[in-house]
Each structure stands twice: as structure tokens, then as C-alpha cells.
């Protein structure tokens, strides 16, 4: 098992800069002994986060199962538990997670024994206990979402387009528990569309991302037993740049919804959902990196949208003015930029009390990131060029900076060199193959930073 500790400070690299911000990659974990999927060579999939027992935890799914990390002191993060999946190996692509009432719920979308698993997490970091491991309710589910306010679990693309389970505790006349968070009860199967890929649900109002059938908003408040019907509150089935309606997230005040169409080159949409009878697209945005860039599982916290952007890594946008979203920060977890297939940043979890951000990358594992304001930054040098990248024996820097520092993947300085003019040639023959990080500065203040690959 390989554990990498990164203490490299990277700054905002964006064509739309609202305010300079700084990203610190505190920790990265990947395990070279785990296999990648046959389909996309992704060893890793979704991530999740927990604040429990005065500590913080990160969860990441792999082809092997579910991994738990104590990240309370992120520089010294460590894996504290692992639960094997019901289905494992190269056939696994997707796992998904959500927690409720001291339990973590885990599903997989591949295999004949992929299994719903429920873990008791109340004793973390000491232990994790499996309290449910069965395919009696369903074998596979692409995604799950738990409406914690109403104790309902929504299993997307499962036995039906979507199935709804009650997680509340129910007693019989003899005060014996017949239903609980560890014994879910099916209360409704939704088949109003052919497929529900993902859902966001708050207080029984469900925003359903239905693939090529667009967006549906349903009221499930009356669904408390099999046979009751949800009510359609609104929909968006025809809109500009419509593709595969993949996922979305609702703002805290319930008026804004971000929506990702999972197609190469399609923009993220910001919707006005204050009137569900009249849903409108307020604006669209993208990473600004490549015409084929593609967003994945975005999350809104406060007025900030965190978007795992596959090949482009994590992208962060200020959406306080939803008609004018501004990219304010990025961190690239995946160096190749050919934008072919599905590779790179998959999931994000920004809700930890510390403000640290969890990111999962399909190929390179678990990341713990930190955002902080910095005053030791000059105005970005947008005319800076570094080429070629990847690098063989040397690279060329065109920059107004007067110094370059190179770090290896452990955060150690391997080169610190003065720059004498606008064009500099940096030899790399003595450096081993791998990923390196550069920091350009002028008069002691950072001007640019990023990644290079030496092969």
C-alpha cells in the first residue's frame, strides 16, 4: 500500500478570476495492489465524509470495497477500517454512499451479488461493524440518496427506475421493532420514467435526474405505503444543450439547482427552481479547459459549487450571482488531458467542519484538499508557458518569474533555480520519471504553479 503526503501549495489557474485563492493538497492515498475496472481502469469511485466523535473521516469506494480514513489531522491521515464489497474485482465501476442516524449505506451497480450493505459507524475510528449485508431488497443500485428529514432512502436505477425505502423505526403492538434504519422497508417503486440515474431529495421533494428523459421534480410526502402515488411538481425535459441528465444539487435556500449533463463538451446548467411550475435555466458554465470537458457529481455548499470534472480535476465556482458563475479555484487530480472516455475526478465532499475537502479520482485515489486565502500572491502571469509537457530531458519556461521550485510527489524540493530572463531552459535528465509540481515566483511571491510529467 502506498501513502503519499503532499504539502504543496497550488494557486488558482482560471480564466475567470474573482479573487485569488490557494489550494493545499494535504493528503493523497492510493493502493497499487488494487485492480482497476475492466471498463475504465478505475480502481476508485465515489467518496463521502463524516464528522463523528469529535473527529473527521473520509470514505472512498474501490473495486475491493469501502475504505475508511481518519483525517482529523489530515497530514497524518490513516486508513482505520475496510469492508469488502459484496461484489469485487475488475467488474466493479460504481459504488455510492450516504449516511443516516449513525449508519453508512453502501451500494454497487455491478455484479449479481453487489448487495446493499449497512455499516454501524458510531465507534469510529476504533471499528466499523456490518449490520446488514443482503440482496433481499435489491441486488444493484447506481446511486442512493437519503432524505434525512423524512428517513427515506431513494435507490436509483435499482429494481425499478427508482425505489423508495422507509428507514424510520417502527414498533408493533408489543413494542418489538419491526422496522428500523438497519431493516429498511420498501414503500414505493417509481416507474414514471425509464431510468432515474440520480436524485437529490429534501423534505420529500425529489429532484430526479432521468438520463435522456430530463429532470423531474416529485413530491413524495404522501408515499408512506406501497400503492400511494407521488405528485409531479415540475419538469424540464427540453432545454438547450440537453444531453444525458446525470445528477444535480439543490442550494441551501431551495431556489437554485445545478445540473450536470454527462456528455463530453456539455455545460453545467444553473436552474431557477423557485417556481417549480416554471423552471428556467439562468446560466451555463464549464471548466474552460477543453471543448470535450465533462462534469460529474457536483455539490453546492453555501454559494459555492464544487464540481468533479473528470480529466480537469476539481473545479470550484462562485454562484452567488447565479446568472454569472465565476470559477474561483481548481485542483487537477488527473494529469492526462486527452478527455477520452471517463477518467479523473469522480466525487467531492465539502461539508466537513474543518473546511477540508474530500475528492476521489478514478485512477489516483483519495485526496484531502484545503482552501485558504493567501496574501503572498502576485497577479497571475497569464502569458506564462511551460513546454513540452510531458517532458523527456528538458522543458522551456517563458515567464516573468525570477525563480522556479520543483517538488516531487512527496512534497520534497528537488530543484530550486533562478530564472534570468523571459525564456529559460530547465534540464531534467537527472530527475526520475513521475509527476512533479512547480512553483513560479517573483520577488518571493507566487505567480504561477502547476504540474509537469517527466517520462
Image (cartoon, rainbow, N blue to C red):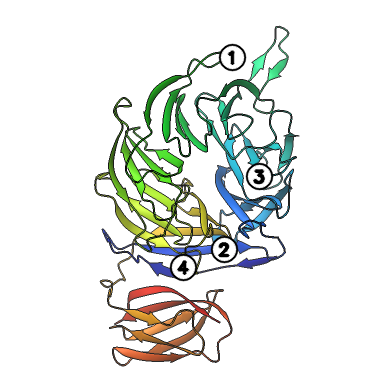
Residue hosting label 1 = 225
Sequence-wise, the earlier of marks 2 and 1 is 2
Residue hosting label 4 = 337
Q: Nearer the viewer, mark 1 or mark 3?
A: 1
Sequence-wise, the earlier of marks 4 and 3 is 3
Callout 3: SS: loop
What numbered label is drawn on residue 386? none
Discs 3, 2 touching: Cβ within 8 Å: no
Q: Nearer the viewer, mark 2 or mark 1?
A: 1
Query: Which part of the image, by quadrant, shows the N terminus?
Result: bottom right
Q: What x and y, as percent, mark residue 175?
A: 71, 11
Residue hosting label 2 = 28
Compared with 105, 446 (above or below) is below
Q: Nearer the viewer, mark 4 or mark 3?
A: 4
Residue hosting label 3 = 124
Q: What x and y, as percent, mark residue 118?
A: 68, 36
Q: Nearer the viewer, mark 4 or mark 2?
A: 4
Distance in Å between CA atoms under marks 1 and 3: 34 Å
Q: Residue furthest top?
A: 173
Label 1 crowding class (10 Å Cα cut-off): few <14, some 14-19, many 20+?
Answer: some
Callout 2: SS: strand
* Residue nearer the viewer, 40 or 148: 40
Amino acid at each position: 500500500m502506498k501513502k503519499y503526503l503532499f504539502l504543496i501549495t497550488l494557486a488558482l489557474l482560471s480564466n475567470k478570476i474573482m479573487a485569488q485563492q490557494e489550494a493545499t493538497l494535504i493528503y493523497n492515498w492510493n493502493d497499487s495492489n488494487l485492480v482497476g475496472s475492466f471498463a475504465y481502469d478505475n480502481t476508485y469511485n465515489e467518496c463521502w465524509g463524516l464528522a463523528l466523535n469529535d473527529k473527521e473521516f473520509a470514505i472512498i469506494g474501490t473495486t475491493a470495497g469501502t475504505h475508511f480514513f481518519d483525517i482529523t489531522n489530515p497530514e497524518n491521515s490513516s486508513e482505520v477500517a475496510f469492508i469488502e464489497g459484496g461484489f469485487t474485482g475488475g467488474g466493479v465501476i460504481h459504488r455510492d454512499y450516504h449516511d443516516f442516524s449513525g449508519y453508512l449505506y453502501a451500494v454497487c451497480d455491478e455484479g449479481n451479488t453487489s448487495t446493499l450493505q449497512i455499516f454501524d459507524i458510531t465507534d469510529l475510528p476504533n471499528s466499523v461493524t456490518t449490520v446488514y449485508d443482503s440482496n433481499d431488497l435489491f441486488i444493484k443500485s447506481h446511486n442512493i440518496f437519503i432524505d434525512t428529514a423524512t428517513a427515506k432512502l431513494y435507490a436509483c436505477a435499482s429494481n425499478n427506475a427508482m425505489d423508495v425505502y422507509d428507514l424510520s423505526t417502527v414498533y408493533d403492538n408489543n413494542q418489538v421493532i419491526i422496522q428500523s434504519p438497519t431493516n429498511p422497508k420498501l414503500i414505493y417503486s417509481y416507474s414514471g420514467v425509464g431510468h432515474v440515474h440520480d436524485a437529490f431529495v429534501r423534505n420529500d421533494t425529489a429532484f430526479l435526474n432521468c438520463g435522456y428523459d430530463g429532470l423531474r421534480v416529485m413530491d413524495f410526502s404522501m408515499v408512506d405505503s406501497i400503492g400511494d402515488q407521488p405528485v409531479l411538481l415540475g419538469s424540464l425535459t427540453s432545454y438547450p444543450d440537453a444531453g444525458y441528465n446525470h445528477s444535480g444539487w439543490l442550494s441551501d435556500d431551495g431556489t437554485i439547482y445545478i445540473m450536470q449533463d454527462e456528455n463530453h463538451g456539455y455545460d453545467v446548467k444553473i436552474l431557477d427552481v423557485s417556481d417549480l411550475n416554471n423552471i428556467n435555466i439562468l446560466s451555463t458554465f464549464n471548466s474552460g479547459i477543453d471543448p470535450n470537458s465533462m462534469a460529474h457529481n457536483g455539490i453546492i455548499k453555501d454559494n459555492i459549487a464544487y464540481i468533479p470534472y473528470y480529466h480537469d480535476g476539481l473545479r470550484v465556482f462562485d454562484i452567488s450571482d447565479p446568472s454569472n458563475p465565476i470559477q474561483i479555484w481548481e485542483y487537477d487530480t488527473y494529469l492526462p488531458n486527452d478527455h477520452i472516455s471517463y477518467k479523473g475526478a469522480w466525487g467531492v465532499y465539502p461539508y466537513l467542519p474543518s473546511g477540508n475537502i474530500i475528492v476521489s479520482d478514478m485512477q489516483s485515489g483519495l485526496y484531502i484538499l484545503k482552501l485558504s486565502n493567501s496574501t503572498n500572491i502576485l497577479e497571475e502571469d497569464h502569458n506564462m508557458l511551460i513546454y513540452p509537457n510531458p517532458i523527456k530531458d528538458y522543458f522551456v519556461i517563458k515567464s516573468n518569474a525570477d525563480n522556479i521550485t520543483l517538488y516531487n510527489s512527496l512534497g520534497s524540493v528537488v530543484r530550486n533555480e533562478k530564472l534570468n530572463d523571459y525564456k529559460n531552459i530547465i534540464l531534467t535528465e537527472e530527475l526520475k520519471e513521475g509527476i512533479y509540481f512547480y512553483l513560479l515566483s517573483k520577488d518571493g511571491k507566487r505567480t504561477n504553479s502547476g504540474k509537469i510529467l517527466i517520462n
